[in-house]
Amino acid sequence: MSTNSRGDKWRIAAVVVGVGSLLFSLAVFRLGYVQKKVAVGEQVKQVVAAARPELDVTSQLNPLTDGYLKSNPGEAREYLVKSIRLIQESKLTDWQIMSASKLPYARLYVLDKRMGNPVLADADLVKAKYCYVRALEGGQNSDIEAARALAEMTSEAFEKMVDEFDKARTGGEGPVYARSIAPQAAPATRP
C-alpha cells in the first residue's frame, strides 16, 4: 500500500504541477494579449496622428491657449510663443500652418501693443498679416481676392478679431492679462 500511495502522491503532484503550469501559461498568454492590445491601441493613435496631424496639434494647442487666456501678460506671451513654435514645427501642410498661425500672431500683436511694446507689436502684425494672406492663397482664393481681404484686415480689424475670439472662449470676460493691464489714462485737461 505504501508503494501505491506513493505513486498516487506522485500522480497528484504531477497533476498539481501540470495545472499550475497551465494556469501560469494562461496568465502569461493573457498578459501578452493585454500588452499586444495596448501596443495596437498605441499604434492606432500613431497612425491617426500621422494621418490627421491637425488633431494632434489641436490637442496640444488647447492647453496652451487656456494658459494664454488665464495668465498675466508675461506668461501669456510665453504661451503664445510656444503655440507658434508648436504649429511651425508640426507636420501640418503649409496652408494649415499659415491658417493655424494667424490667430496666435494676431494675439501676440494685441498683447505686445497693450503692453506698450510698439516694435514687437509691429513685427507681430506683419507676421499675422503674412499668415493671413498665405492662408487665403492656400484656401483657393485668387491673388486679387487675397489682396482685397488683406486690405480689409487692418490692425484694428486684427484687434477686434482677437477680442472676439478671446471673449467667446472666456464667456465674455476676455483674457486675464487684458484685465490686469491698466488702461492708458487720458491726459488731464483743465476746464
Image (cartoon, helix red, strand yellow):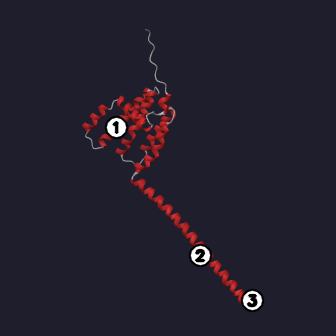
Q: CA distance from mark 1 to mark 3?
A: 94 Å
The residue beneath circle 2 is 22
Q: CA distance from mark 2 to mark 3?
A: 30 Å
Instruction: Where is residue 46? Give x, y as percent.
Output: 45, 56
The relative height of residue 15 versus residue 47 in the rendered view (above or below) is below
Q: Quadrant of residue 101?
A: top left
Q: CA distance from mark 1 to mark 2?
A: 65 Å
Instruction: Where is residue 147? Give x, y as percent.
Output: 28, 35
The residue beneath circle 3 is 2
Could you classify mark 1 by the number of other residues whose Cα lies within 10 Å: few (under 14), some (14-19), or many (20 or more)? Answer: many
The numbered mark, 1 or 3, whose residue comes first in the sequence reads: 3
Q: Residue furthest top?
A: 191
Q: Residue furthest bottom?
A: 1
The relative height of residue 191 versus residue 131 in the rendered view (above or below) is above
The numbered mark, 2 or 3, whose residue comes first in the sequence reads: 3
Left/right placement of residue 148 relative to residue 17 reads left
Left/right placement of residue 175 relative to residue 26 reads left
Q: Residue furthest front?
A: 171
Query: What amino acid does circle 2 point to?
Result: Leu
The residue beneath circle 1 is 132
Residue at position x 58%, y 73% from top? 25
